[in-house]
Image (spheres, grey):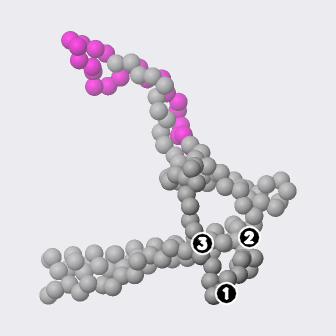
Amino acid sequence: MAKKKSKRKAPVKHQATAEAKQRVPQKASGELEFFYVKSTGFRVVHADGIHGGVVPTGKHLHMAFFNERNPIPKSQVYQVEDGRLAAKPIRVDEKEGIVREVEFEAIMTVSTAKAIRHWLDSMIQSAEMVQEQNRHDDAGTKDEND
């Protein structure tokens, strides 16, 4: 039996905006176009977590995004025999523990944080729907191959 192709909706990209009723320039048509321009400092980072909290004034929140990894050794010493390097070092100078490399920090108002929370909730829901559809599609493919 041929597998039915599901009509999976592509994940929708949404934006998080702090103020739903922010002031915007008005055009006669009632439309406003936004142009997204990447700053010279734009980069994509991997985040394993965040560290942050409320700033002392209470007016803003801060979030420092970090990734986690094992420490890179400061140095390693290898035995050399007949011009060949041994497979493992005989001495290693390295830190113990886990490195949390802080990539960037974001400071925002509470209303912006709420907008981001709303956006994240929406994106999580969309991702879970796609994952569930993929599990369903994979199960159907597995049944056909049995």
Secondary structure beneath disc 3? loop
Closest to the camera, between mark 1 and mark 2, is 1
Residue 120, position in %: x, y?
A: 58, 70
Is 48 situated above or below 126? above
Q: For the residue carrying disc 3, how many other residues have a C-alpha within 10 Å: few (<14), some (14-19), or many (20+)?
A: few
User: Residue visible at 33% across and 85% down?
Assistant: 7
In this view, the residue farthest toward the top is: 82
Residue placed most toward the observer, 62 or 140? 62
**Which segment is the magenta one?**
79-100
Q: Which mark is residue 111?
A: 2
Is 138 situated above or below 109? below
User: Residue visible at 16% across and 86% down?
Assistant: 2
Residue 102, position in %: x, y?
A: 59, 45
Look at the image and say whether residue 114 sits in the magenta stretch: no
The residue type indicated by label 1 comes to Ala
User: Residue visible at 55% across and 74% down?
Assistant: 14
Closest to the camera, between mark 3 and mark 1, is 1
Is 114 situated above or below 78? below
